[in-house]
Amino acid sequence: MRRFFVFALAALLLILAAGCQWLPGDIAAPPPTEPTATTAAPATTPTALTPPPRSYKGITEGDVLPGELTFYCDCAKCNGADCAGITADGTVLADLGPEDTPVAGANWLPLQSLVEVGGTVYRIADRGGPGLNRVGRLDIFTPEGHAAALRLGRVRDIEVRIIALGSAKK
Ligand SMILES: [Zn+2]
């Protein structure tokens, strides 16, 4: 019985093998598939993941707030004798060059926040007296010195745009 099966199998294989040769050549190979018009795959440009705006004490990144500017320098009169020339975040004011982000003081924003006033971006690197507690109040560091700071005086009715809130806890 087994022998029969082996024979039958061998015969079947022979038929199949022969069958392949019987196929006419022109239909043996499937017609070449037309290269389908490749619809341009959507560009896989990695979309920059923009984090949602952060908030701090009711102030949200992107906010534009009414504000007021005063100006200070790195002298003892402006900073106090014991910390003259060094900001609350440890920036040595005298080391700031023209390529550095201008520095401002404010008490209502986390240190390292970035704000923009009149097209200039300032980094909140300093703290000051209670006058700087009010939202929108900025004390702008003036590298030109004390006389220059006094001359600039006080600028009211400005707009302060919150670019980024610093993550510093103090
Ligand atoms: Zn000064």
Image: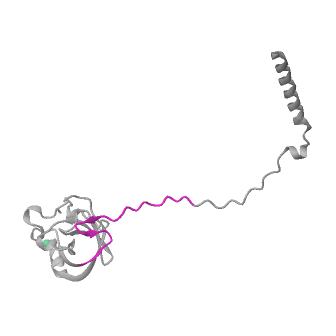
Q: Residue 168's x, y, as percent?
A: 23, 58
- Ligand 1 quadrant assignment: bottom left
Residue plotted at (22% across, 62% down): 111
**Looking at the image, is 102 positioned above or below residue 68?**
above
> Which of the 4 image quadrants contains residue 5?
top right
Residue plotted at (31% across, 68% down): 61
Q: Identify the image's colour scheme: rainbow, by chain, secondary structure or one colour.
A: one colour
Furthest toward the left, the residue is 81
The quadrant in which the C terminus is found is bottom left
Of residues 92 and 154, the one drawn nearer to the viewer in this rendering: 154
> Which of the 4 image quadrants contains residue 38?
bottom right
Q: Residue 104's x, y, as percent?
A: 22, 69
The chief SS type of the magenta part is loop
Does the magenta portion include 59? Answer: yes
Residue range (magenta): 43-66
> Which of the 4 image quadrants contains residue 108?
bottom left
